[in-house]
Image (spheres, rainbow, N blue to C red):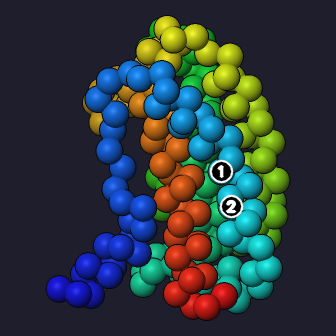
Amino acid sequence: MQQALDLDQLRYPIGKFKWPETFILDQVQHAVNEIETTPQHLHKALKALDDDQLDTPYRPDGWTVRQVTHHLADSHMNAYIRFKLALTEDVPAIKPYLENRWAELEDNKLDVSVSLHLLEALHKRWDSVMRSMSTEDWQREFFHPQQNKNVPLYKLAALYAWHGKHHVAHITTLRHNRGW
């Protein structure tokens, strides 16, 4: 039982994501602020890690720190595109992707600075879009075919505020547990 609990804590160091039930502007603004600062938190979490540390899984059978870093770039690029689609089209269907397969591709062996720089630039653009959105814009939706439902942008912002913190916590928890 203890091992399962520890594994669950390693998987979800900040807890599992909970979808917001209603639109609350203050919560959306908090999510935007969290998304804006994700690259800085990631940069701090990665500081001074060597290649052996970057290639260490954050949990048994989990991704390495390097893969987590590149996954953040992949995932947040997809989220940014979903935002732009929903803002410019009427309930567009998005294209899901197989994140585990993406994590196995060759670009996930690159230095983490590549994805960190990408995230810094991406989040500047994403932040610019989000901070210009009206209350009505936050209600705009896209259709997620795997979930067979429409997802409003205020819920996507909440998810990605959590997502960045979730993966940064994977790295910081590993650092703490290993004494790095």
Q: Could you tell me the amino acid type at mark 2?
A: Leu
Q: Which mark is residue 42?
A: 2
SS of the residue at dot 1?
A: helix
CA gap between label 1 and label 2 equals: 6 Å
What residue is drawn where x is 48% and y is 22%? 25
Q: Report the side of 99 relative to 71 (left or right).
A: left
How dense is the environment of label 1, judged by Cα within 10 Å: few (below 14), some, or many (20 and up)? many
Image spot of residue 14 (x, y percent): 42, 61
User: Is disc 1 in contact with disc 2, using a CB cutoff of under 8 Å?
Assistant: yes
How dense is the environment of label 2, judged by Cα within 10 Å: few (below 14), some, or many (20 and up)? many
> Looking at the rendering, in which quadrant would you find the C terminus?
bottom right
Image spot of residue 60 (x, y percent): 42, 84
Q: Nearer the viewer, residue 165 or 94?
A: 165
What residue is shown with label 1? 38
Image spot of residue 49 (x, y percent): 75, 81
Q: Is residue 24 above or below residue 146?
A: above
Residue 155's quadrant in the figure?
Answer: top left
Q: Could you tell me the amino acid type at mark 1?
A: Thr
